[in-house]
Image: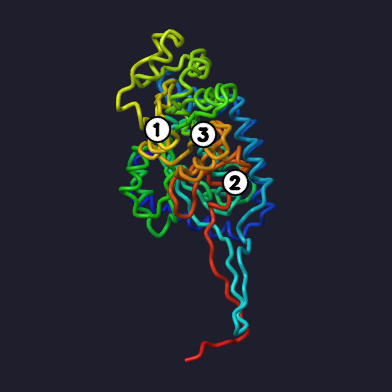
C-alpha cells in the first residue's frame, strides 16, 4: 500500500465511512465477541508479532528512547490482549440516554450518546497504540484509521493482518480498521480527509502534535506530551517519597507519564540523598540547581550528578535523566509547574492536607496526584481497559480517554403531532 495516490486514499476513507455506518447496526454481543477473538488471536500469533517487532527493533539503537516504546515482549502482548478483553467486558456507552426531559407542549427530548463515526489516529513508535485504538473504536462502533510511524511498520502490519482476519471471521467489514502506509503523505491525507474522518487524535511527542494541530483540516483532540513534575513538600514523608519518585521516574522512562522534574522544598534538602538513592541504583542522571547539587554532593554518584541548565526545565526527557529544582514555598513550586507544565500529570508528596488541597485546586493539569506516582496516568489503571490517549486540552475530553470519550451525542425529539406556534 506504499506510494498510493490521492484517489486511492479517498477510496480508503470512503470505505471507512461505509464501515462506520455498518457498525452502527451491529449488536454489542458481536462487537465484544470480535474483541475477545482478537485477543485470543494476539496470543496465538505472539511469535509472528515478535518476529515482526524484531525487524523494527533491529533498525534502531537499543539506547534510543523510542526503543522501549517500540519493543514488544510476550508479557506486553499478553497485557495488550488482557486490556482488549477488559474493554470487551465493559458496558458500551453508545445509545446511553444522558438526559431526558419533557417540554410543556409534551415534546420529549433525549440526549443520546452516539459514536463519532470515523476516528483517525497518527502515532509514533507505539505498536500497542494500534491495537488499543482498534479495541476502543470497535467497542464504541467507530471505524478507525491509523497512521503509524515508520519505525513500527512491520509490527503494525502484522497486527493489522490479525485484526483483519478476525473481522472477516466475524463477518464484519474489514474497513472498520484501516492501517495507512507509514509514509508522511499518509498523515497529510488523513489530516485533510474532510467529510470522511470525524476526528484525528495524535499520539506522540510535541513535534507530531504541533504538526497535526497546524495542518489538520478535520477536528483534532490533542494528546499532549508529558512534562511531568513531582513536588516534595515541606511535610512530605521520606519513605513514601523514595518509592513514589522511583516509580514515577524509572518504571518506564520512555512513556509520557514518567517524571521529568523533581521539585523539593528547601527545608527538606537534608532528605534529598535518601529520596534520590533509589535513582542512583537505576543510573538516573540528575540535572540539579545549585542548592540541590550541594545537598547531593558526595551522596549521589558524581558521574550522574550535573548542574542544571535553563533547558533542563520544561524538557520531556523520555530517558534516565531528571531535572531537580529547589523552592522555598508551595507557591513557588506551583509557579514553576505553571511555567513549564504540559498540563498532563503533576503530583505532590505531603502529609499536610491543606497543602494537598491548595495543590490540587491550583495546579492546572489533566491529572493531579497526592502521594501517588504519575505512572498511574493510564487508561488501564483508571479502569478503562485501555486508552485512546491522554488528552491535555479542555474541550470534549481531558485525561485518559476511554470509551465515553469516543462518543459524541445527538438529540432525539419525540412528539405526537405538536406544531410550533407562529
The front one of 361 and 26 is 361
Q: Which residue is mark 2?
A: 167
Secondary structure under badge 1? helix
Mark toward the viewer: 1 or 2: 1
Who is closer to the viewer here, 332 or 94? 332
**Tag 1 near tag 2, CB within 8 Å:** no
Residue 284, position in %: x, y? 45, 17
Element type at mark 2: helix
Residue 128 at what x, y percent from top left? Answer: 53, 34
Numbered badge on residue 47 = none
Q: Earlier in the sequence, mark 1 or mark 3?
A: 1
| Residue at mark 1 to residue at mark 2: CA–CA distance | 25 Å
Mark 1 or mark 2, which has the lower sequence index?
Answer: 1
Image vertical order of residue 70 relative to residue 381, above or below: above
State which quadrant residue 238 falls in. top right
Please tell me how crowded label 3 is: few (under 14), some (14-19), or many (20+) other residues with Cα within 10 Å: many
In the image, residue 199 sits, relative to residue 329, either above or below, namely below
Front residue of 351 and 274:
351
Measured in 3D between alpha carbons, the distance from the residue under mark 2 to the one under mark 3, in whole angstroms, is 45 Å
Q: Label 1 neighbourhood size at 10 Å, few (<14), some (14-19), many (20+)?
A: some
Disc 1 versus disc 3: distance between alpha carbons? 38 Å
Q: Residue at x 53, y 46 (%)?
A: 401
Check disc 1 and report the residue beneath it: 150
Amino acid at each position: 500500500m506504499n506510494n498510493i495516490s490521492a484517489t486511492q486514499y479517498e477510496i480508503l476513507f470512503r470505505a471507512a465511512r461505509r464501515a462506520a455506518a455498518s457498525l452502527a447496526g451491529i449488536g454489542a454481543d458481536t462487537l465484544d465477541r470480535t474483541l475477545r477473538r482478537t485477543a485470543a488471536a494476539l496470543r496465538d500469533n505472539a511469535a509472528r508479532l515478535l518476529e515482526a517487532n524484531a525487524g523494527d527493533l533491529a533498525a534502531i539503537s537499543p539506547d534510543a528512547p523510542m526503543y522501549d516504546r517500540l519493543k514488544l515482549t510476550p508479557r506486553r502482548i499478553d497485557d495488550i490482549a488482557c486490556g482488549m478483553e477488559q474493554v470487551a467486558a465493559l458496558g458500551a456507552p453508545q445509545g446511553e440516554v444522558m438526559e431526558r426531559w419533557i417540554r410543556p407542549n409534551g415534546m420529549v427530548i433525549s440526549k443520546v450518546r452516539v459514536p463519532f463515526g470515523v476516528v483517525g489516529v497518527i502515532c509514533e513508535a507505539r505498536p500497542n497504540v494500534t491495537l488499543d485504538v482498534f479495541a476502543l473504536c470497535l467497542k464504541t462502533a467507530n471505524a478507525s484509521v491509523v497512521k503509524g510511524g515508520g519505525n513500527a511498520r512491520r509490527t503494525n502490519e502484522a497486527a493489522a493482518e490479525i485484526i483483519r482476519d478476525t473481522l472477516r471471521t466475524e463477518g464484519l467489514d474489514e474497513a472498520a480498521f484501516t492501517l495507512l502506509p507509514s509514509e508522511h503523505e499518509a498523515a497529510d491525507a488523513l489530516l485533510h480527509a474532510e467529510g470522511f474522518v470525524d476526528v484525528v487524535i495524535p499520539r506522540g511527542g510535541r513535534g507530531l502534535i504541533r504538526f497535526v494541530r497546524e495542518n489538520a483540516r478535520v477536528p483534532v483532540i490533542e494528546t499532549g506530551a508529558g512534562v511531568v513534575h513531582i513536588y516534595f513538600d515541606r511535610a512530605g514523608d521520606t519513605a513514601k517519597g523514595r518509592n513514589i519518585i522511583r516509580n514515577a521516574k524509572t518504571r518506564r522512562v520512555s512513556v509520557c507519564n514518567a517524571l521529568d522534574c523533581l521539585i523539593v522544598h528547601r527545608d527538606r534538602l537534608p532528605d534529598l540523598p535518601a529520596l534520590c538513592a533509589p535513582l542512583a541504583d537505576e543510573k538516573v542522571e540528575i540535572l540539579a540547581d545549585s542548592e540541590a547539587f550541594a545537598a547531593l554532593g558526595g551522596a549521589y554518584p558524581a558521574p550522574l550528578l550535573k548542574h542544571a541548565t535553563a533547558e533542563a526545565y520544561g524538557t520531556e526527557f523520555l530517558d534516565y535523566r531528571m531535572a531537580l529544582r529547589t523552592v522555598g514555598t508551595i507557591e513557588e513550586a506551583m509557579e514553576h509547574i505553571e511555567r513549564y507544565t504540559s498540563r498532563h500529570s503533576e503530583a505532590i508528596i505531603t502529609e499536610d492536607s491543606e497543602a494537598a488541597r491548595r495543590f490540587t485546586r491550583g495546579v492546572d493539569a489533566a491529572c493531579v496526584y497526592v502521594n501517588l506516582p504519575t505512572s498511574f496516568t493510564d487508561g488501564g489503571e483508571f479502569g478503562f481497559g485501555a486508552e485512546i490517549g491522554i488528552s491535555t486540552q479542555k474541550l470534549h475530553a481531558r485525561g485518559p480517554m476511554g470509551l465515553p470519550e469516543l462518543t459524541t451525542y445527538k438529540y432525539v425529539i419525540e412528539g405526537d403531532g405538536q406544531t410550533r406556534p407562529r
